[in-house]
Image (tube, grey):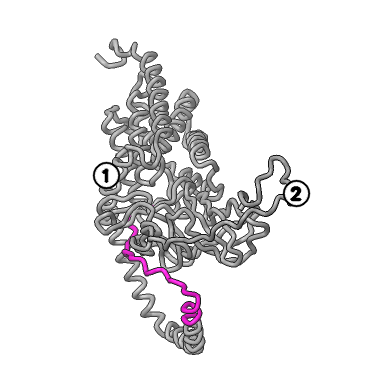
Amino acid sequence: MPAGVVQPLNPVTWLGAPALACMAGSLLLTIPVEVAGVGLPQPVLAILPAFAWAVIRPSILAPFVLIVLGLFQDLLWGDRLGLWPSALLAAHAMGYSARPLLAGQGFWTHWGWYLAALGAGFAVAVALMFFAAGQAPDPGGLAIQVIATAAVFWPAWRLIETYEDADVRFK
Amino acid sequence: MSLRDGPLNELRPPLAWLAVAALVLAGIVSLALFVNDHRGSPLDDIRGRFDSVAGVAGGVMSAPVHWVADGAAAVGAYVDAGGQNRRLRTQLAQARRLEAEVEALREENGRLRAILGVKTDPPLPMVGARTVLDARGPFADTRLADVGSDQGVIEGNPALNDNGLVGRVIAVSRQVSRIMLLTDIESRIPVLIARTNGRAILTGDGGPAPRLDYLRTHDPVRPGDRILTSGDGGVIPRGLPVGVAVQAKDGWRVALDTDAGSIDLLRILLFKDFSQLVGANALQPGVLPPTTTDAPAPAPPATQPAAPSGAAPASKAK
């Protein structure tokens, strides 16, 4: 689809399809591949729609789809259930709070706020793990996952570009 | 009539507030799930079902990766045949020198064992496994292996690769099992320092080298000391190789032996508890021979000084 073409907001396409794509992508990234004896970093792909959905428009369904996405992530990675749903909702809330400021802004402004949303999500995840395990995760491993997740912003930007003008009630 | 001109346009404020309410409600649900989730909770059944499905999907998806890896290894071995041959010749020469020494030590060891009456542990049964899914990150470091309860795997079984202990099984379904690596933030394994027999807890934190916590005894560890499983608690057998102690800024850490190789192929020890090692009969209470004691000696004459008030008489203290 060429850029700039506005799509109507159908929950299946703007919520369901990105969620399924995230699940498939997360599953693919768990294949045990090593390059020079080192496993590839695993970005948290579900943060992409968590941010994009908040920017596109307010939604009642989106938080519950994020719970499903987060639970899938927890089950796939063997985390405690509820860890990633909470983190994704924190990222979603951060994106939602920035929504009025992001109207009409370009890629880099969106990316800056995406980093803030990423920070909120990971801060919640770290706090919860500190509560559960009695210690914070290793800063090196944390930095690698944050950088990997920050680097894959482009699909979220495409999702925002595609749907941000679709519902004029919220412009 | 367009949506913008219609009555639905008035929905904007309520919908925005409803979205916030939905976000808050979803947050409460997520936190409640997190607080109430722990191993052994009813949610384990969901985990098991998910792992079964994910294991099948992972097996299919990772098969091409395994084929490519196996093929690359075969090609690499073929290309490197000359160099490999030289290395093997050198190793063979060293091995021949060591063989005689080992044979002498083995004989001496056997004689000493016989003198001391030492009983060695019988070999533990084990199953081979291949990892099909791999979660790497600061919050979880687990692998899904393609063996499960059908092959006799149970929760708590230790998993090893060629070099040492990788982790332990934390969840099992019929055909797959989830292995928590030593580096996982929630991993805790009792270990000992081979040189001093000092005990510690190996604590994962999501980084590559787990910490040594709760070190007992004064100055129990030095850089380069071998770290083995201690067997304390009875979950993991004693003596499995773990790694080497290294000094870090925040205390002692362990450079894991498993870092030397891939965690692709695993062996899972079917270890239940220590009763498995000695057999059930050996643990039955035996019938002890009757004990005979001599009659107590007659009381000494009254010339002995009286015991201080509150102190037990000597015969009672015994």
Give the foreground label among 2 and 1: 2
Residue sitting nearer the eye, B89 or B243: B243
| Mark 1 residue type | Arg
The image position of residue B245, as x and y in percent, is 59, 62
* Residue positioned 55% across, 43% down in the render: A135
- Element assignment for label 1: helix
- Is residue B311 left or right of B38 when viewed as pictured? right
**Same-chain check, marks 2 and 1:** yes
- Regarding residue A118, the answer to whether it shows in the image is no
- Regarding residue A133, the answer to whether it shows in the image is yes
Queried whether the magenta region covers residue A92, the answer comes back as no
Q: Quadrant of residue B154?
A: bottom left
Disc 2: host chain: B
- Is residue A61 left or right of B98 when viewed as pictured? left
Residue located beneath label 1 in the image: B49
Disc 1: host chain: B
The image position of residue B56, as x and y in percent, is 25, 53
Which stretch did the figure color magenta?
B109-134
Residue located beneath label 2 in the image: B305
- Is B317 rendered above or below residue B26? below
Q: Quadrant of residue A67?
A: top left
The image position of residue B141, as x and y in percent, is 44, 51
The image position of residue B215, as x and y in percent, is 61, 54
- Is A44 rendered above or below residue B60? above
- Is residue B215 left or right of A126 when viewed as pictured? right
* Residue positioned 51% across, 60% down in the render: B293
